[in-house]
Image (cartoon, rainbow, N blue to C red):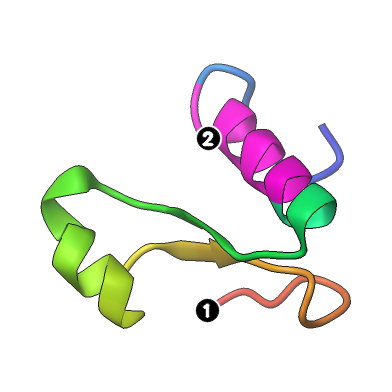
Amino acid sequence: DKLGFAAGSMGPKVEAACEFARLTGKRAVIGALEDIERIVKGEAGTIISTEKTGIEWY
C-alpha cells in the first residue's frame, strides 16, 4: 500500500489510527499494552495526529 505497511501486520492498525485522527482531530497511538504507562507519557508507541502535515519517521 502507499504507506508501506503490510496488510497482515501494521497495515490495519495504521489505517484505523489514521482514520480516527482524521475524523476526530485527536491523536491516535499504536503500542504494546505492556507499555501503556510509557505510551500515556509520550515515551513509547507510534503517534498519529493531524497536528502536522506529512510523515515524520524517527
Q: Disc 1 residue type?
A: Tyr
Position of 3 relative to 44 (above/below): above
Residue at image coords 25%, 47%: 32
Residue 28 as seen in the image, left or right of residue 39? right
Q: Please check the rendered image and state whether residue 18 is part of the magenta-colored stretch, yes or no.
A: yes
Q: Earlier in the sequence, mark 1 or mark 2?
A: 2
Residue at image coords 60%, 65%: 27
Which residue corresponds to mark 2? Answer: 10
Q: Position of residue 33 (x, y in %)?
A: 20, 45
Which residue corresponds to mark 1? Answer: 58
Q: Residues within 10 Å of mark 1 (few under 14, many from 20)?
A: few
The quarter of the picture where residue 55 lies is bottom right
Find numbered disc 1 in the image and state the secondary structure of the residue it sits on: loop
Position of 27 relative to 24 (above/below): below
Q: Position of residue 38 (x, y in %)?
A: 20, 72
Q: Residues within 10 Å of mark 2 (few under 14, many from 20)?
A: few
In the rendered image, is residue 15 in sight?
Answer: yes
Q: Disc 2 residue type?
A: Met
Q: Position of residue 52 (x, y in %)?
A: 80, 82
Q: Please check the rendered image and state whether residue 34 is part of the magenta-colored stretch, yes or no.
A: no
Residue 37 as seen in the image, left or right of residue 42? left
Find numbered disc 2 in the image and state the secondary structure of the residue it sits on: loop
Residue at image coords 28%, 81%: 41
Residue 4 as seen in the image, left or right of residue 58? right
Region rendered in magenta: 9-20
Q: How far apart, in angstroms, are the residues tagged by discs 1 and 2?
A: 16 Å
Q: Is the C-beta separation of discs 1 and 2 under 8 Å?
A: no
Q: Outermost residue toward the top?
A: 8
